[in-house]
Image (tube, rainbow, N blue to C red):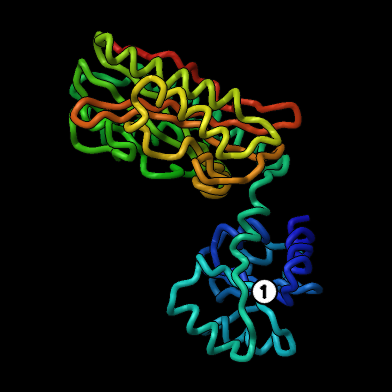
Amino acid sequence: MRLEKIRRRLAENKLDALIVTSSPNIFYLSGFTGTSATLLIEPSRSILFTDFRYIEQAAAEAPGFEIIKVTGDPYAVIGEMVQGLIVIGIEEEALSWGDFQKLQQALSGHRFENASVIFKKLRQIKDETEIALIRQAVRITDQAFVQTLDKIYPGMTEEELSLELEFCQRKMGASGRSFDYIVASGTRSALPHGVASSKKIQKGEFLTLDIGAIYQRYCSDFTRTLFLGKPESKHLEVYDIVLEAQLAGVKALKPGVKAKDVDAVAREVITRAGYGEYFGHSLGHSLGIEIHETPYLNTRDETVLEPGMVLTIEPGIYIPDWGGVRIEDVALVTNSGLEVLTQTPKQCIIID
C-alpha cells in the first residue's frame, strides 16, 4: 500500500525514480530496521541496497523488495541501474553535503529534485496499524507516569527521576525513550527543554515532566507539571491559565481547520491572561516514527487538518527565575472531531 502511494507521488511529481536514504523513511516504506541501507524506487521495481551484515534481515523485513548486497558506495551501483532515467527524487534534508557530492558524481547527467516534502505529506496521515502502535506507546507513557508518582520525593535528583521513568516504560514494553526526557524543577521548569540534571527536587517547586516511549518504532509524547508541597496562589493561577489554553486547543482541533488556527486559539488564552510573552514555542506537532513530524501547530503552518493525523497539544508558560508550566496530550483527528489518546488527568498534581 505504501509503495503504491509513493509511486503515485512519483507520477504526480514527474519523477522517474526515488532514492531513499533516511532511516525513518526506509523503515516507513520497507519495514527494514537495520542501520545501513538505501532504497531505489522506480515505477516497476523496488530495490534495497545493504551490506553483508543485513542481507538476511532485509530479506525477512522487506518483502516486495529486491535485496542487493553492496561492498562499497551504493550510489555507484545505483548510478549503473538508473541509466535512461532523467529526474531522480532525493531526500535533500537527509543528505550531508559529502553524500550529495558522491551522488552527483555517481549519477552525473541526471537531474535531482527534492522529494522530502513527499514523505512529510505521506506520513501525515496514519493508517490503522500506525494509530494502534501510537496508542500503545501513549498508554505505556500514561501508566509509567502514574506508577512513578509515588516514587518522587524531595532530595531526589532530576536524573534519578528520569531513569525511574524510563525504566518503568521499558518494563511495560517500550524499546526506548522517544527523546531526552525533560525533568525540570524549580526555576529550571522555566526552561522549555530543560533536560534532567543533577539538581535535587525540593518542596515549594514546580516539577515539569516531558517524557515519551518508543513502541515498535512509534513514539509517544507527554507532559505534566506537578507541584511539591503547598502551592502559592500564583502557582495555581499560572497552572490554570495553561490548562485553559490546553483545553481550548483540544477543543479547536478538528478536521478542516488550519493548523495555525488551532495554535491561535490556545495562544489567545495565554495572551489574554497577560502571559503571552512567556509562551514562545509552537502549540504542538505531529508524531509517529519520529517524535517531531509535520504538520506543526504554530503561527505559520497552513496545513488543513485531516482524519488520521496525530498531534500533540502542549501550551506552556515559562517565567525566568520563577518557573514554568506545560501540559501536553496526544490527540487523533477523526472524521467527527478528535480523540484524546492521553488518559492521565490534567488537574495540578500536588505531592506533599
Up the image or down, 350 lies above or below 263; here it is: above
Three-letter amino acid code at the position of disc 1: Leu
Q: Of 15 and 194, which appears nearest the observer? A: 15
Q: Is residue 19 left or right of residue 93?
A: right
- Residue 174 visible? The answer is no
Quadrant position of the C terminus in the picture: top left
User: Residue at position x 64%, y 71% from top?
Assistant: 39
Q: Is residue 122 above or below residue 134?
A: below
Is 309 placed above or below 235 here? below
Q: Residue 344: horizontal and vertical position, in percent?
A: 50, 20
Left or right: residue 209 versus residue 32 is left
Please say whether residue 50 is visible from this viewpoint.
Answer: yes
> Which residue: 30% across, 21% down?
152
Residue at (50% x, 45% y) in the render: 291
Q: Which residue is mark 1?
A: 40
Residue in view at x 48 percent, y 83 percent: 101
Q: Is residue 47 left or right of residue 57?
A: right
Q: How many marks?
A: 1
| Quadrant hosting residue 17 | bottom right
Q: Secondary structure at mark 1?
A: strand
Q: Is residue 97 above or below residue 298?
A: below
The image quadrant of residue 109 is bottom right
